[in-house]
């Protein structure tokens, strides 16, 4: 395949990729209302079940305040979080809450809570190991394959 | 989502074990499979340029998460395959990149979700948004996932080394 044709094909495929991301953004993939739905009509969702991926803003006694979504965001007080879990939660923690919206969508009564990231340490671990994994994959690939910049293609290194 | 180290180690184990039965699947093609295993996480490009920013500029809804799907795996694997030189290499590259990307999505599936269901509704896109019960084995930051992945990769590395030694002995004799 000539490099000009290759560039054209990759360009077309990138457009398909962008189209996929646009179609994905417009698709209705969840059975639950999202943060943008709730932000648009806070009173209209009381009593509905949601699965909210949220960030903990503050933990003060029994009150766990979280922020749901980005642009627009919804601030919620999560009720029904066990004392043991509340003690482990820190501001910045990423948690999932499955529960029922209440009180003009200012309260989320939790049936189940899952902690994805307790805080900075968990995030650093995930990013650190991901960078290491990416370097290993790239390093092993480039050990066996070289980039021919003139032809814009990968070619096997014959000596390995 | 599991971190990339686990994805790469598990892909190494998968494709190295497959190489015992598929003659052309040598180490250079295993390396292609490793790259495939992190393709779906190209949605992390959203950390550089957010989906909301692109939506604001383009005026259309846009979500990088579309890449972390079955459809995304097909598109990204095809883009990668086109960058190989010969037609045969392109076919093989697509196969390995797609299998690697698929392994990524499968490893990501059995995570813990608060409603007890997998997020197959997202990963299967553009297929219908079906959801199935999740065994809830882990969350992204669980350290044991990388430890188990490393153990599996080491076992496969050991078996592969032993098999190569056996082959070399047969050739020498």
Image: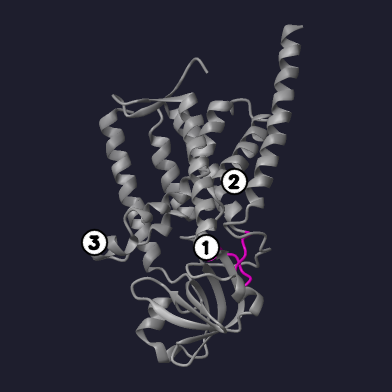
Q: Are marks 2 and 1 on the same chain?
A: no
Callout in the foreground (3, 1)? 1
In this figure, which residue is indicated by the disc labeled 2? B6
Report the quarter where the C terminus of chain B lies. Answer: top right
Q: CA gap, disc 3 to disc 1? A: 34 Å
Q: Which residues are magenta?
A: B110-121
In this figure, which residue is indicated by the disc labeled 1? A119
In this figure, which residue is indicated by the disc labeled 3? B58
Pick the front one: B116 or B94: B116
The answer to whether residue A99 shows anywhere in this view is yes
Of all chains, the one bearing label 2 is: B
Label 3–label 1 contact, CB within 8 A: no
Place residue A9 in its image quadrant: top left
Of all chains, the one bearing label 1 is: A
Q: CA gap, disc 2 to disc 1? A: 21 Å
Residue depicted at x 73% and y 23% = B163
Provide residue B92's location: percent of width, then percent of height: 51, 33
Please indicate whether residue A147 sits to the left or right of residue B58 in the image.
right
Report the quarter where the N terminus of chain B lies. Answer: bottom right
SS class of the residue under badge 1?
A: loop
Residue depicted at x 63% and y 52% = B143
Callout in the foreground (3, 2)? 2
Provide residue B5's location: percent of width, then percent of height: 56, 44
Residue depicted at x 41% and y 92% = A43
Please indicate whether residue A154 sits to the left or right of residue A46 in the image.
left
Magenta-highlighted stretch: main secondary structure? loop
Please indicate whether residue B111 sits to the left or right of residue A72 in the image.
right
Asked if residue B78 lies in the magenta stretch, the reply is no
Q: CA gap, disc 3 to disc 2? A: 35 Å
Asked if residue B116 lies in the magenta stretch, the reply is yes
**Badge 3: residue crowd in 10 Å (few <14, some 14–19, many ≥20):** few
């Amino acid at each position: 395949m000539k490099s000009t044709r290759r560039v054209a094909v990759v360009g077309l495929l990138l457009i398909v990729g962008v189209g996929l991301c646009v179609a994905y953004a417009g698709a209705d993939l969840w059975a639950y209302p999202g943060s943008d739905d709730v932000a648009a009509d806070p009173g209209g969702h009381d009593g509905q079940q949601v699965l909210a991926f949220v960030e903990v803003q503050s933990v003060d006694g029994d009150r766990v305040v979280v922020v749901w979504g980005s642009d627009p965001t919804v601030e919620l007080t999560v009720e029904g979080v066990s004392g043991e879990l509340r003690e482990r939660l820190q501001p910045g923690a990423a948690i999932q809450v499955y529960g029922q919206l209440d009180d003009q969508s200012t309260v989320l009564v939790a049936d189940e809570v899952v902690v994805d990231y307790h805080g900075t340490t968990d995030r650093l671990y995930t990013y650190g190991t991901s960078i290491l994994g990416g370097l290993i994959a790239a390093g092993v690939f480039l050990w066996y394959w070289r980039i021919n910049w003139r032809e814009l293609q990968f070619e096997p290194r014959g000596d390995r | 989502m599991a971190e990339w180290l686990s994805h790469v180690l598990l892909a190494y184990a998968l494709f190295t074990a497959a190489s015992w039965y598929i003659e052309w699947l040598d180490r250079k093609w295993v390396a292609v499979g490793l790259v495939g295993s992190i393709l779906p996480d190209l949605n992390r490009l959203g950390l550089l340029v957010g989906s909301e920013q692109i939506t604001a500029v383009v005026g259309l809804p846009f979500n990088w998460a579309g890449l972390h799907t079955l459809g995304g795996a097909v598109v990204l694997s095809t883009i990668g395959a086109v960058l190989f030189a010969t037609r045969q290499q392109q076919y093989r590259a697509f196969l390995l990149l797609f299998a690697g990307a698929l392994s990524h999505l499968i490893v990501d599936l059995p995570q813990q979700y608060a409603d007890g269901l997998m997020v197959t509704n997202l990963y299967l896109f553009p297929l219908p948004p079906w959801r199935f019960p999740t065994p809830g084995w882990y969350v992204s930051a669980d350290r044991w996932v990388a430890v188990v992945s490393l153990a599996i990769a080491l076992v496969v590395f050991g078996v592969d080394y032993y098999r190569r030694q056996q082959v070399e002995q047969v050739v020498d004799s």
